[in-house]
Image: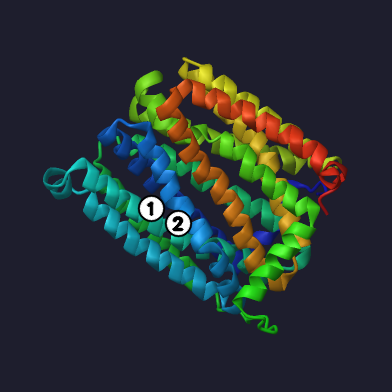
Amino acid sequence: MVRQHPLVLLTILREREFSYFLSTRFLVIFSLYMQTTVLSYLLYKLTKDPLSLGLLGLAEVIPAFSVALFAGYFVDKNEKRTLYLRCILFYILNAIFFIVITSQFFLQHYTVATISTFIYIGMFTSGCIRSFLAPSSFSLIPLLIKKTDMPNAITWSSTTWMLGSILGPLTAGFLMTFMSVTSILVITGIGLSLSSFFIFRIKPKEISLQQDLGIIKSLKEGFRFVFKHQIILAVLSLDLFAVLFGGAEALLPVFSTDILKVGEVGFGWLRSAHGIGSLLLFFILSYVPLKTQAGNKMMFSIIGFGLCIILFGISKNFYLSFVCLLVAGMFDGISVVTRHSVLQLETPSEMKGRVSSINMMFISSSNELGAFESGMAARLFGTVPSVVFGGIMTIIVVIITFFAAPKLRALNKLT
């Protein structure tokens, strides 16, 4: 990454279709994070069982393995903007489903087990949609900008995602103090509907024609590329295994309700702390970029992430817990920038859909499987011990990667 004046970062916004893409991306992420925040809080309020939060993560991770690979192949063969639009329309339908099952009628006439099952089904559906949305988004970006603008595009795309992931939970936590879950879910449906307006403003793009090897051979080709590219494999593996054990954020409803006792607004702030930290890191990197030793800095940042998770687990003070998650987000931001840059710069255009799907498998596995691991461990060993154990295992994984991936250690500049 090269140092750039902040005004240079703004020039890419003159590309109208890229600006429409950013607007769409923000509204989608903002709405989905609001949706997940209120549903996870409602689920724990109904069940009082941390395992239910783990099952919520498991419901989303299953599509990462059952649908994602097919989705990547499908995206590579079809027009990206249209696929992105269709994903949003399915999200809108799923939002309507959530509105119905959280209504007062359902809460009064159906058991907790039935409502929980419906929530899991809705999250599974959301995971299936995301399996197509992620590679569509990843493959669409290069079609909207010049190749020389790719570093700026990555910065804006990541920043937009972070803004949505911050403001979504914060807004949900604030609204939960005086609005019902169903009313908030109506707002998320409106946000998703607005996002479809902006994606409509982007024209369909030409498909890069290539020889169709068939789905099996094409998927093998994607995996072969990833596993032969040590740096890509290493950055994906770090997300898979490190965040798998550092998935403490899935237990935030437990911490906010039973340990820190800060209620809905406090829960919203804790849920947003990670994103706030990552966003701060992105602004810092715009002035002080990762000029050298990007690989080593990524690994040491994940060690810092693990230490923050350990401290968060033992904290009994809301402000200390918030700072721990915020700093953890800053450390994680270094990993995000490195991984996104490596994937965009090292992956050929004709393979971006498949490689993005493989990336999604790793990322979904790390986040949602991490949520399941945290929920299961909290049920078996207690909430605090499970979080501390996860932070320790995160550090161990980085140490193993440091010695197992010499090319990542040698990664210098992200250019």
Q: Is 35 in front, or is 122?
A: 122
The quadrant the C terminus occupies is bottom right
Q: Residue at x 78, y 42 (%)?
A: 289
User: Could you tell me which residue is drawn at 68 percent across and 46 percent down?
Assistant: 237
- Image spot of residue 35 (x, y percent): 37, 48
Q: Is mark 1 on a helix, strand or loop?
A: helix
Please identify the quarter of the rendering in which residue 402 is found: top right
Q: Which of the 4 image quarters holds residue 206?
A: bottom right
Q: Eyeballing the image, is 389 above or below 70?
A: above
Tags 2 and 1 touching, CB below 8 Å: yes
Element on which disc 2 rests: helix
Residue denoted by label 2: 127
Residue type at mark 2: give it.
Gly
What's the mark number on residue 123? 1
Q: Viewed as shown, does residue 40 lie left or right of 102?
A: right
In x, y percent, where is residue 390? 57, 29
Task: Give the residue type that dot 1 points to.
Answer: Met
Of 52 and 82, which appears nearest the observer? 52
Disc 2 packing (10 Å; few <14; some 14–19; many ≥20)? many
Residue closer to the observer: 250 or 404 = 404
